[in-house]
Image: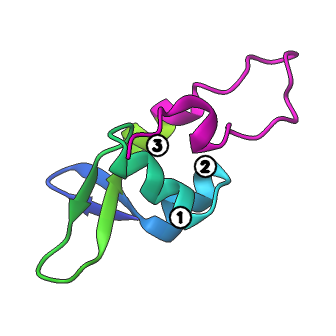
Amino acid sequence: MIEIDGVEYLTANEAAALLGVKRETLYAYASRGRLRSYRRGIRRERLYRRSDIEALLRLQPAAGQGDDLPLPKAESWIPFTS
């Protein structure tokens, strides 16, 4: 975790692990506008606000309603556009 001006950011690996998805799925969320990523410096490294990741986690079913189900795949709730 990285803190910048009091805001917590996660690396792609950290964000994907917290969501329980692959990095490719995380990138799909960002490319389709469901999650915002931030470039760090001049490198290609992308960061994700921890609060945004936690907001995605709240989309999971409530307790007792499929607790064992992972966050849905991007394809199931993000419209595909070509």
How packed mark 2 is, by other alpha carbons closer than 10 Å (few <14, some 14-19, many 20 or more), is: some
Residue 2 placement, left or right of 77: left
Q: Amino acid at mark 3?
A: Ile
Asked if labels 3 and 2 touch by Cβ distance under 8 angstroms, the answer is: yes
Q: Position of residue 77 (x, y in %)?
A: 56, 30
Residue lying at 39% horizontally and 40% vertically, measured from the top left: 81
For residue 53, which numbered disc appears in the image? 3
Please name the residue that numbered disc 2 is placed on.
19
| Relative depth, front residue between 60 and 27 | 27
Determine the CA span between mark 3 and mark 1: 15 Å
Q: Amino acid at mark 1?
A: Glu
Q: Amino acid at mark 2?
A: Leu
Range covered by the magenta-colored residues? 55-82
Mark with earlier residue (1, 2): 2
Residue 34 placement, left or right of 39: right
Q: For the N terminus, give its image quadrant.
A: bottom left
Assign a secondary structure to mark 2.
helix
Determine the CA span between mark 1 and mark 2: 12 Å
Foreground: disc 1 or disc 2: 1
Mark with earlier residue (2, 3): 2
Q: Position of residue 45 (x, y in %)?
A: 29, 76
Residue lying at 35% horizontally and 54% vertically, measured from the top left: 48
Asked if labels 2 and 1 touch by Cβ distance under 8 angstroms, the answer is: no
| Relative depth, front residue between 15 and 27 | 27
Please name the residue that numbered disc 1 is placed on.
24
Q: Position of residue 78 (x, y in %)?
A: 49, 34
